[in-house]
Image (spheres, rainbow, N blue to C red):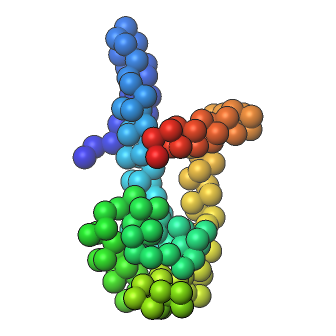
Amino acid sequence: MAEPQAGSLIGAHATKAPPSLLYMVKQVELVVRSRLDELVRPHGITALQYTALTVLERHDGLSAAQLARDSFVTAQSIADLVRSLEGRGLIRRERNPRNRRELLILLTGEGRALLTDCAGPVRELEERMVAQLTAHQSEQFRQALTKAWQALS
């Protein structure tokens, strides 16, 4: 899928109604995912795998269902993702001491090291995304996104 050209969301059709918020959010998501894939691919992972690792960095010891939900993938997709990350030594699974039938997914030292390696380029991507905003606008943007997410969750 071709990415939109710079400025194509607004400006190109100035006489027409502006695009819907849902359309704009999807366009931003597509560009972010594409750029994120470019950044993490040299580390041998995908943007989805990176997302799962960052979820575990914030909330280590999740069930597969919790990880799927927080990583925005289906329960069916998480099994392959977990197998792949475990095979690379980036995560490990262990029994939940409170429920021996449940396996918890944990980030390994190698997983943490990979996230550290990716942190600078990912931070630069975030900074680029809000480069045309003031610090106050950037914080308002973060708050608005949080409220939108909460309203739909």
Q: How many marks?
A: 0
Residue 63 falls left or right of residue 145: left
Quarter of the view holding residue 59: bottom right
Residue in the foreground of this view, choosing between 141 and 30: 141
Q: Nearer the viewer, residue 131 or 149?
A: 149
Check the image and report above or below for 81 versus 139: below
Location of residue 150 in the rendering, given as x and y in whole percent from the top left corner: 53, 43
Q: Residue at x 31, y 68 (%)?
A: 75
Q: Nearer the viewer, residue 18 or 152?
A: 152
Residue at the (29%, 77%) spot, across then down: 80
**Residue found at the far top of this picture:** 15
Relative image position of residue 20 (x, y in whole percent): 38, 24
In the depicted structure, whether residue 7 falls above or below residue 38: above
- Does residue 95 appear in this view? yes
Name the spot of residue 43 as percent of width and height, x first: 46, 76
Q: Residue at x 45, y 91 (%)?
A: 100
Q: Nearer the viewer, residue 94 or 26?
A: 94
In screen coordinates, is 59 left or right of 49? right
Residue 143 picture quarter: top right
Rendered image quadrant of residue 46: bottom left
Q: Residue sitting at 42 percent across and 46 percent down?
A: 29
Q: Is residue 6 left or right of residue 97?
A: left
Q: Is residue 31 above or below residue 132?
A: below
Estimate the x, y position of residue 136 in percent, counting from the top left: 74, 34
Work out whether residue 93 can be spotted: no
